[in-house]
Image (tube, rainbow, N blue to C red):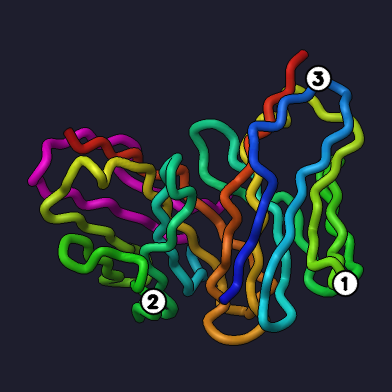
Amino acid sequence: GNSVTQMEGPVTLSEEAFLTINCTYTATGYPSLFWYVQYPGEGLQLLLKATKADDKGSNKGFEATYRKETTSFHLEKGSVQVSDSAVYFCALRESGGSYIPTFGRGTSLIVHP
Amino acid sequence: DARVTQTPRHKVTEMGQEVTMRCQPILGHNTVFWYRQTMMQGLELLAYFRNRAPLDDSGMPKDRFSAEMPDATLATLKIQPSEPRDSAVYFCASGTSGGPTGELFFGEGSRLTVL
């Protein structure tokens, strides 16, 4: 079956530091890949996505590149802010079948001033 | 601004009581998902509907949980009887069935505490 593996958190950074959150996946077909963000007390919301190999998704200074050869979709940001503190979920949706998303466990990010 | 609406936002109840959570998906969305979020298990899929038909409820404890979509504007998740281990945040999400590239839109969740 499909699976998504994310690095364990929490990730603790100082403001303006560089962020990487690793995500690798296992899928039988050609999935679309997503990063969702969950702010405290809220539901998940889409941060960015990529639908085919070598695509780069970007939003709010965050980027992730769909790497088929390494089955990865790492999230990066060059300079984090306190307001980026949240839980980040990597997810995939398979290209065939029911399209049920598979989510990773989530990685908590804490940014200190 | 279209959004998924969930009620109640918070619910405290005693073991053995019935709990019903409601979700209004975004107008025009024809897929609805129910998820449960806990620290230990993360996000667990409980049920999935497409065009109001249940397609997957394999993650749902059938003896006490039930999920329905009486119409396109309402999805319900019921727990009867509730147990302390059901304490969690329950999320509803909706989307379009346009294939694998579509995003899900999540509600703000219903936080359930069973004493």
> What residue do we see at 87% from left, 26% from top?
A17
Label ID, residue B56:
2
Image quarter of the C terminus of chain B: top left
Query: Left or right: where does residue B25 sit relative to residue B16?
Result: right
Instruction: Return the x and y of residue A101 as percentages of the image width and height.
Output: 57, 67
- Which of the 4 quarters of the picture holds residue B95? bottom right
Residue under disc 3 on the same chain as residue under disc 1: yes
**Frontmost residue, B98 versus A37:** A37
Q: Residue at x 27, y 51 (%)?
A: B21
| Chain of the residue under the numbered disc 3 shown in the image | A
* Chain letter behind tag 1: A
Q: Is residue A29 magenta?
A: no
- Residue B7, given in percent of the width and then of the height, sits at 32, 45
* Numbered circle sitting on residue A69: 1
Residue A8 to residue A110: above or below: below
Badge nearest the viewer, 1 or 2: 1
Disc 1: CA contacts within 10 A as few (<14), some (14-19) or many (>=20): few
Is B103 located above or below residue B50 in the figure? above
Q: Which residue is mark 3?
A: A14
Q: Amino acid at mark 3?
A: Ser
Which region is colored magenta? B1-25
